[in-house]
Image (tube, rainbow, N blue to C red):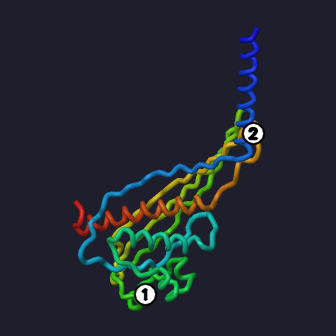
Amino acid sequence: MLQTNRRILTYILSLLLLFLTGCAADTALRQTAPVEQETYPTITAPRDRKLIAILGFENKSTYASDKLWDTSARLLFTGILEQGYFRVVEWEKMKQLFDWDTLATANLVKSPEKRGEARKILLCEYFLTGAVTFFDVSQVAEVSAMSKRKTFQTTIRVDLLLQDARTGEYLSAAAGEATERQEFNGGLTGGQTGTWDPGSADVALNRAIRQALHRLTLSYSRSAGGVK
């Protein structure tokens, strides 16, 4: 009899613990964003590092954002500095020399005259332009008798073009694409399952730009005889 009562008590306590755990998960929803570790082979910088200028970053995607061009160019500028293969004109200086509309549309490289004027002002050897060509946020919801889950997936693609500042010849091109995920889990009693965080787009954008920059530099280095 005593053993039977103990079993019943253990069973009741197990159910209570399961219920409380579900309520806690419902009250404090968990957000997870798996980070993929990306490593790139080192590209040895030449002794004569070319000076490049970022002449703009267009938003060709369907995602509307007034600052996407500026954020993208800032991330690209930082990526170039950290990579150390090229010298680069400071992005803040570029915004002082040229208006936002010109940089947001990469208008300076679209005609020989404007490209020539930019070269005289900047005294650089190469021009670099970029474009966000794909920006998508998708949502998937999963509901079961025990829990509910909502997943946001942000995918961004960018394209980069490297040009000779004097001739306008395209020297290298590359694309990068990255996906960032957010997961929100609810407990037994359901409840809210979170909303999309724009910060995940910044992470995906940075990863896509770094990937494209590495590919562009590797392609240029190979064509210049630096990498076999």
Against 46, is 11 above or below? Answer: above
Against 98, is 199 above or below? Answer: above
Helix, strand or loop under label 2: helix
Residue type, mark 1 in image: Ala
The percent coordinates of residue 155 (x first, y second) are 55, 55
Q: Residue at x 70, y 51 (%)?
A: 194
Q: Residue at x 45, y 83 (%)?
A: 111
Mark number displayed over residue 118: 1
Q: Quadrant of the N terminus?
A: top right
Helix, strand or loop under label 1: helix
Quarter of image, res 219: bottom left
Against 82, is 4 above or below? Answer: above
Q: Residue at x 38, y 55 (%)?
A: 39
Residue type, mark 2 in image: Cys
Mark number displayed over residue 130: none
Mark 1 surroundings within 10 Å by alpha-carbon count, few (fewer than 14), some (14 through 19), many (20 or more): many
The percent coordinates of residue 148 (x first, y second) are 70, 39
Quarter of image, res 117: bottom left
Residue at image mark 2: 23
The percent coordinates of residue 141 (x first, y second) are 68, 43
The percent coordinates of residue 18 (x first, y second) are 71, 31
Of residues 111 and 199, the one nearer the viewer is 199
